[in-house]
Image (cartoon, coloured by chain):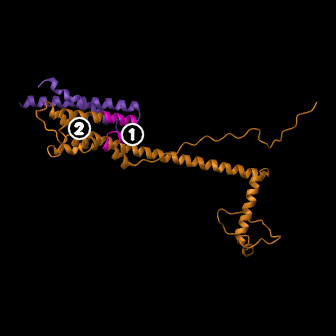
Amino acid sequence: MSWMDLLWLPPVMVAIAVVLGAAGRRGFRPIVRSIWSTFLTLTFGVIAVGVAIHLVARIFA
Amino acid sequence: MDAAPATPSTLPTTPPAPPAPLPPAMGRRSGFVAAALGWTIPGLGQVYVGRPLKGLLMLVTIGGLFALGLFLTGFTCVDPYSYGLEFVAHMWIGGPTAAAYWLSRDIVLVEAQPYFEVGRLYAAVAGLLNLVAICDALGGVIEHNEAATERNAARAAELWNREAAALAAVEESTDAGDDLIAFDTQTSLHEHQAEAERGPDQPQAPGAPTETPPHDPFGSPDVSSNEGDLPR
């Protein structure tokens, strides 16, 4: 498995961040701010989950 | 040296300014229509409630993800018989799902797609994201209807105030005796009231008074006739 295999992840993360960030908000700036914060949350959440899975696999391997 | 004739102080020197135009009344939106439109085409519900840019953003995002998923699977991922669980997610994006299912009903994959699983994920996520977009459109309907209620109430209050001001102006000019049209209207109203009381067929008795008591808008009983019964 290489880093190239993770290229499928950014498009779906961007789509989730855009839709969840824009939902329930009005105005250009609040929507952009919410999309950015949602994207950062998703990114760091996915990285954290990935690191945790690697650590658990390393420990129990 | 002759002095200029004095202008009567009762005559208005400038005509009154016309009132500012009222804002148009806002129509209400139906949540069912918004949900149906958003289900048919992603983002159309947002356009229905008056947020076209947000609808365009939803259309590009959700539609693009769904189209990318279709492309990566060779247009074969929308199949309720082969991928029933994912079809539950596809059902939330009704129009594109129906179109993809109809157009790809005769497509058979002859070779394996390298990113088939990724395409299945994209299409399923797009369907679930459209559920979020539908909920957003329903929230937009609620906000729109609340704004419409407030605006229409303010408009009705402004109309009421303008009519009250116009009535007050007419009454004031009638009291001053310089508005013959209003006086004539009031006189004819009294004549109509007198005719209604005596009946339309009976002619008016000569010399009968045409004065009628002023109309009481509250309908209170006439206590003047019972004045003798009251203890003094």
Above or below: residue A51 compared with residue B28? above
Question: Picture coordinates of residue B31 (x, y %)?
Answer: 38, 48
Residue B216 coordinates in the image, percent (x, y) = 68, 63
Q: Amino acid at mark 1?
A: Val
Q: Colour of chain A?
A: purple
Residue A26 found in image quarter? top left
* Residue B72: image location, x then y, percent: 18, 32
Q: Relative to B96, is B138 on the left or the right?
A: right
Q: Give the structural element (helix, strand or loop) at label 1.
A: helix
Horizontally, is B107 left or right of B170 in the view? Answer: left
- Closer to the camera in the image, B96 or B198: B96
> Which residue sits furthest front?
B106
Neighbours of disc 2 within 10 Å: few (<14), some (14-19), many (20+): many
Q: CA distance from mark 1 to mark 2?
A: 22 Å
* Magenta highlight: main SS: helix
Q: Is residue B135 above or below residue B1?
A: below
- The image quadrant where one finds the N terminus of chain B is top right
* Badge 1 vs badge 2, beta-carbon distance below 8 Å: no
Q: For residue B135, which quarter of the picture? A: top left
Quickly name the residue at label 2: B125
- Write down the quadrant of residue A44 in the picture: top left
Q: Which chain wears orange?
A: B
- Crowding around mark 1 (Cα neighbors within 10 Å: few <14, some 14 to 19, many 20+) is some
Are both tags, 1 and 2, on one chain? yes
Magenta segment range? B39-60
Q: Disc 1: which chain?
A: B
